[in-house]
């Protein structure tokens, strides 16, 4: 829900805008995912190299098997079993990697959806600020005119000093408030458009 401009200080509005513009959550998630993929790839290469080495050792032992002892045959069998287990482990790691990619994509989609919603909220919020700025500018001109008119009326209609001072103070206070509000709006809009 977009908050009312009147309820926020300039600092609070700038902070809210920065929050809307931030893509750090998506960027951080993507960076972590890329690092994970690199790590998985390196580990996969290492495992493949290890499996290849074991297979080469098995082939070498099989070539020497002729006339070998039971102990040698058992060693070959153990090597074969170890290789099978390592291949199964590699397949499991590949499956885990696929699941991690799917989870990452789901999280990324969720964050991007949230970011799009925040961007839309920001757009609505900025339009409200622009409307408020456009409405405030003519009010300031009217107040300036009323202050000038009051000075003329004092001379022409001979307003009492007390009546003049009270009305003059009221108009100038209103003018100051609206001028400050307009300055704050223009400052915030300038910061957001950077």
Image (cartoon, rainbow, N blue to C red):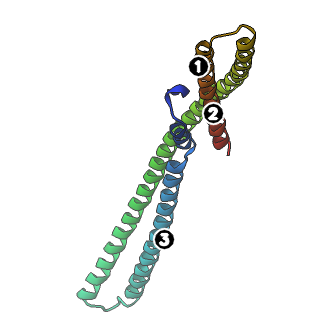
Vertical side of 31 occupied by 60: above or below? below
> Residue 143 — which label?
none
Q: In the image as oriented, which residue stretches furthest toward the top? A: 157
Q: Position of residue 36 (x, y in %)?
A: 46, 61
Residue visible at 62% across and 26% down? 178
The residue at which mark 3 appears reads as: 42
The residue at which mark 1 appears reads as: 170
The image quarter in which residue 51 lies: bottom left
Q: Please tell me which of labels 3 and 1 falls first in the chain.
A: 3
Mark 2 residue crowding within 10 angstroms, few (<14) / some (14–19) / many (20+): many
The image quarter in which residue 135 lies: top right
Vertical side of 46 occupied by 134: above or below? above
Q: Nearer the viewer, mark 3 or mark 1?
A: 1
The image quarter in which residue 141 lies: top right
Residue visible at 36% across and 70% down? 86
- Whether residue 153 sits left or right of residue 172 in the image: it is right
């Amino acid at each position: 829900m977009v908050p009312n401009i009147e309820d926020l200080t300039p600092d609070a509005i700038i902070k809210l805008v920065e929050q809307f513009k931030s893509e750090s959550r998506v960027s951080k998630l993507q960076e972590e995912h890329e690092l994970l993929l690199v790590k998985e790839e390196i580990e996969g290469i290492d495992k493949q190299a290890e499996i290849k080495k074991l297979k080469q050792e098995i082939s070498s032992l099989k070539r020497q098997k002729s006339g070998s002892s039971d102990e040698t045959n058992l060693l070959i069998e153990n090597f074969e079993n170890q290789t099978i287990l390592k291949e199964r482990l590699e397949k499991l790691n590949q499956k885990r990697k696929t699941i991690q990619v799917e989870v990452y994509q789901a999280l990324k989609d969720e964050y991007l959806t949230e970011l799009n919603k925040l961007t839309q909220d920001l757009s609505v919020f900025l339009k409200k600020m622009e409307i408020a700025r456009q409405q405030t500018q003519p009010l300031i001109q009217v107040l300036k005119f009323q202050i000038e008119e009051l000075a003329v009326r004092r001379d022409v209609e001979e307003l009492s000093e007390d009546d003049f001072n009270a009305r003059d103070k009221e108009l100038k206070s209103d003018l100051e408030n609206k001028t400050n509000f307009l300055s704050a709006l223009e400052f915030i809009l300038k910061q957001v458009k950077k």
